[in-house]
Image (tube, rainbow, N blue to C red):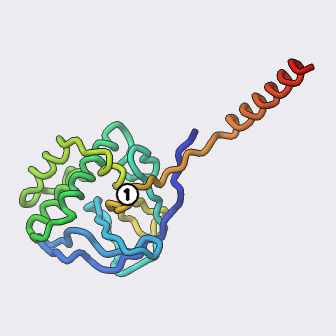
Amino acid sequence: MGLAPARAAQISFTNLPETLENGTFNGFLGATVDGVSVNIICNDYYSTTQIPSGPWGYNISTLPALAFARFGSGDAGPQKYSAAAVLLAGLVDEVDAHAISSYQYALWTLFSPSVASYGDSASLLNAAQNAVPDASLIQRLRIYTPAAAASNQELLGLSDKPENFLIASPEPGSIVLMGVGFLLLSVVFHRAKA
């Protein structure tokens, strides 16, 4: 069976994060995903998107299937996104501007190691990389990767709904094999009956 994204999403950016520190906007930015308001965060320090803007086409990924995730290749991909989920969980209820900036820089450094640490970002990143996130947190992580070059920022968010955006779809060969099996069972059944 193959795993594929259930759907692409349309994302519009509505407002910048409220925290401006160290010359960057830090924390969750306001957006809508298919018309539903969400809080998402940029994980790529070197990409930008004009705000407000959109809608832009994005692919949604979840762990462990990172086919569309920008930083998902190799063995380190799932580990990076697991650590990102831990950082997002810590950031969700944070209100202190300096702490929000530290979480943002930890996230940026996780995916772009050349980004300089800021505030407590190094210790937050170290703790997130050494944490073992629970399954429910991993299921809530959403990775939004641009489908086109119009918006180039990969974004992360935590869903309130632990549903999985992946659908298992049978391969055509499996369906044919199953049909042949039913046909053979029918022949065997009719011969045994006669």
Count up the numbered dots. 1
Quarter occupied by residue 152: bottom left
As rendered, which of 46 and 63 lies closer to the eye?
A: 63
Residue 168 placement (x, y as % from top left): 55, 45
Name the outermost residue toward the front. Answer: 193
Name the kind of residue labelled 1 in the image.
Arg
In which quadrant will I find the C terminus?
top right
Determine whether the residue tagged by mark 1 lies in a helix, strand or loop: strand
Residue position for label 1: 142
In which quadrant will I find the N terminus?
top right
Residue 66 placement (x, y as % from top left): 42, 47
Residue 38 placement (x, y as % from top left): 35, 71
- Where 49 sits versus 74, above or below? below
Seen at 21% across and 68% down, the residue is 27
70 on left or right of 21: right
- Where 64 sits versus 160, above or below? above
33 on left or right of 1: left
Seen at 45% across and 66% down, the residue is 149
84 on left or right of 193: left
As rendered, which of 110 and 62 lies closer to the eye?
A: 62
Seen at 17% across and 41% down, the residue is 130
Residue 104 placement (x, y as % from top left): 19, 62
- Where 74 sits versus 165, above or below? above
Seen at 35% across and 61% down, the residue is 159
